[in-house]
Image: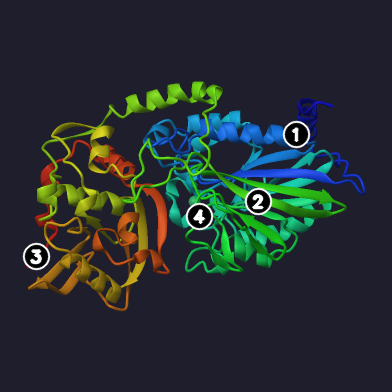
Amino acid sequence: MSPFIAGALILALAGCSSPPLAGPERDKTYAITVLHTNDHHGRFWKNRDGEYGMAARKTVVDAIRAEVALAGGHSLLLDGGDVNTGVPESDLQDAVPDFKGMNLLGYDAMAVGNHEFDKSPAVLAMQRQLARFPLLSANIYRQGERLFDGYKIFSLGGVRIAVMGLTTEDTQRLGNPENMQGLEFRSPILEAKKLVPELRDKADVVIAATHMGHYADGQHGNQAPGDVEMARAVPGIDLVVGGHTQNPACMRAENVLDTAYVPAGPCQPDRQNGAWIVQAHEWGKYVGRADFQYRNGEFKLVKYGLIPINLKMPDAAGNITVASSTYAAPITENAEMLALLMPYQDFGLQKLQVEVGRSDAKFEGDRFVVRKQPTNLGLLIGLAMIDKTRADFAVVNAGGIRDSLPAGVITYKDVLKVQPFGNTLVTLDLTGREVLDFLQVATRLGSGSGGFPHLAGVELITASGTILQARIRGEFVDPTKTYQMVINNFMAVGGDGYPKMAVHPSFVNTGFVDADVLRAYIAARSPLRVADFSPKLHLDAAPIQ
Ligand SMILES: [Zn+2]
């Protein structure tokens, strides 16, 4: 039988989960390959250096699927969620190109990620309609019913494979409450505990497609538990295809993550309580490939690897350009995928020229000004960050402000000139003591440097550069109380001289892109009056000296 006929049979069987599917034959070895991605975040198109993109991804996926089928095996293509949010060309089109691209790639299922709730329920409904594969989540409920299918059972040559979806319960905390009204995010671990025994009855293999995060050794800090914690708590899972933490889940030793993983190098996936745990970094930078053998009830991993999708080597100075060489042999882009996506890419670029709002005067972002003194643009950006995250105060590094906003019409392109890096917002819950310490470091990041801080929501009382007190929401900071701060991910890793807050236990990368947050804030308040954003209005009688 040709591999193409075999493929058609797989699809036909997968469509019906009742009556019970026939099981695998005794003493027969089945080759099953699971391909996986996660945290796509709007990257349907390659970046300007030619890295990743769905067209090159399709070349790789097609080649593996053909190779597996020719050898008599079967394959599944799964995603760990967060298709939405990350680049304007996708965000402006509600990730339609991304879901169409996933259809053409032939995804079999995906987990629902927290960023699937960034847009309105109507957009999510449209995306579900568009997807020719199920969005799975067993632990999201509305009025006592699951909002999505909790699982789907596939029959691959007779081996019944249950794929269960799970979503981080942090979604409720991370996202916009307006888009989640009436929804209940139950504990994915408790849900899996109930569901897995049921699936073990119906299927030969149980895979969890999750969007919960991979925390090495289960060290999840004050974020919700992730894949490691779930696998330890729930027996009977063969494989976890994860997402959310956006790391390659490659281990250096048992329970120790290889934080210096180099593309094209060997990757040892995590293993907990009999379950393999895999995650393919983010943005389609890799396609993960797990080759299994199924025989008489045993599902054995025979080979694993992360295939880099045209990722490029930085030069000695850390720069990557379109001319840089790739870590592995260059991958050509699939023509059919290019033809599908090109009109969306062009339309997205055009849409960047569209007006998002207006202003009665210029917002000051000149490099030589913003690195020396607070400006209306610094305050506008900070207030937008507070508005999006509901944090108590924001600190904006001057180095992250790259241009002014013009008087009159403001386009998305203008906003992207101000914030071109695609930085994401990070929140931290700090004690008053930690707040004062952080602000003290910030105010000492010299005038003229990229570290010069723009503040919103907090007023400082200083003497000779030393902070005597700070006020948040009109009250003096209490060293023992907790306050939420919002900064960007660049600052959080120590960029521009800031304290490295990414190691703080309360660190949360919200995934919200700075320019998109600013665009939405401007659009909602347009026309803007520059006088309303005078930083002086927000400073104490004894401002920063
Ligand atoms: Zn996520």
Tell me the distance, in whole angstroms, between the alpha carbons under discs 4 and 1: 30 Å
Which image quarter is the C terminus in?
bottom left
Amino acid marked by disc 1: Ala
Q: Verify CB contact (< 8 Å) between mark 4 and mark 3.
A: no
Quadrant for the N terminus, please: top right
Q: In the drawing, does residue 36 fall left or right of residue 445?
A: right
- Which disc number belongs to residue 247? 4
Q: Furthest residue to the right?
A: 26
Mark earlier in primary sequence (4, 3): 4
Tag 3 residue? 543
Residue type at mark 3: give it.
Answer: Pro
Residue at mark 4: C-beta within 8 A of ligand 1: no
In depth, the one of 186 and 344 nearer the eye is 344
- Dot 3 surroundings within 10 Å: few (below 14), some, or many (20 or more)? few
Q: Residue 4: which quarter of the image?
A: top right
Task: Tell me the residue that label 2 is attached to.
Answer: 304
Asked if residue 249 lies left or right of residue 399, the reply is right
Q: Amino acid at mark 4?
A: Asn
Q: CA distance from mark 1 to mark 3?
A: 69 Å
Q: Which residue is the site of mark 1? A: 69
Q: Residues within 10 Å of mark 1 (few under 14, many from 20)?
A: many
